Image (spheres, rainbow, N blue to C red):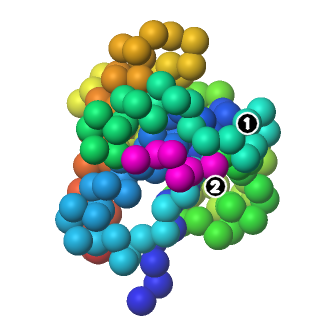
């Protein structure tokens, strides 16, 4: 069976997108669906390539039973557009960068992560990098809602 390939994307791949990767991975593991997916995260910029997620993101995630320390930042590459079924952007800037870099034939794979949680009232996951602890908690709250919504959407579409 072909795996559903999902790529979560933010700017530097050390806060929001690895958090989304961790949250979604935990969710599908709890649902017994891990074998159906290939999950990764990446950044639109190469600021932190090879680094682990931000320690504040790791701490906030760990408090919710999500481990991120094994992840390493990487930059989105051209092959990601063909290789992934879904590229889920965290905000307007990264959505625009993905669309600009993406071949026309694969643009329908790109969406906002929070499009899968319209009830939260925002389309952008805010960047917590320069904020305090609450920013990382807010990211987790939003991402958990969107991850559940995304999984439900896949079920509704009959993909799982």
In the rendered structure, the answer to whether residue 148 lies left or right of residue 97 reads left
In the picture, the disc for residue 48 is 1
In the rendered structure, the answer to whether residue 76 lies left or right of residue 86 reads right
Asked whether the viewer can see residue 25, the reply is yes
Quadrant location, the N terminus: bottom left
At x 28%, y 44%, the residue is 65
Q: Is residue 68 magenta?
A: yes
Asked whether the viewer can see residue 95, the reply is no
* Magenta portion: prevailing SS class: loop
**Image location (x, y in percent) of residue 83:** 64, 70
> Vertical placement of 17 versus 84: above or below?
above
Label 1: few (<14), some (14–19) or many (≥20) C-alpha neighbours in 10 Å: some
**Image location (x, y in percent) of residue 107:** 64, 55
Residue carrying label 2: 107
User: Considering depth in this image, is 118 or 25 the residue closer to the camera?
Assistant: 25
The span picked out in magenta is: 67-72
- Which residue appears farthest toward the left when viewing the image? 31
């Amino acid at each position: 069976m072909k795996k559903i390939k999902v790529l979560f994307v933010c700017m530097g791949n050390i806060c929001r997108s690895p958090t989304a990767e961790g949250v979604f991975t935990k969710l599908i593991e709890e649902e017994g669906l891990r074998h159906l997916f290939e999950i990764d995260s990446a950044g639109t910029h190469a600021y932190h390539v090879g680094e682990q997620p931000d320690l504040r993101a790791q701490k906030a995630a760990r408090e919710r039973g999500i481990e991120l320390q094994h992840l390493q930042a990487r930059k989105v590459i051209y092959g990601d557009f063909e290789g992934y079924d879904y590229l889920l952007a965290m905000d307007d800037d990264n959505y625009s960068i993905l669309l600009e870099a993406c071949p026309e034939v694969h643009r329908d794979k790109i969406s906002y992560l929070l499009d899968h949680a319209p009830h939260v009232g925002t389309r952008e996951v805010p960047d917590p990098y320069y904020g305090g602890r609450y920013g990382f908690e807010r990211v987790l709250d939003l991402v958990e809602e969107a991850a559940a919504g995304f999984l439900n959407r896949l079920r509704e579409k009959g993909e799982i």
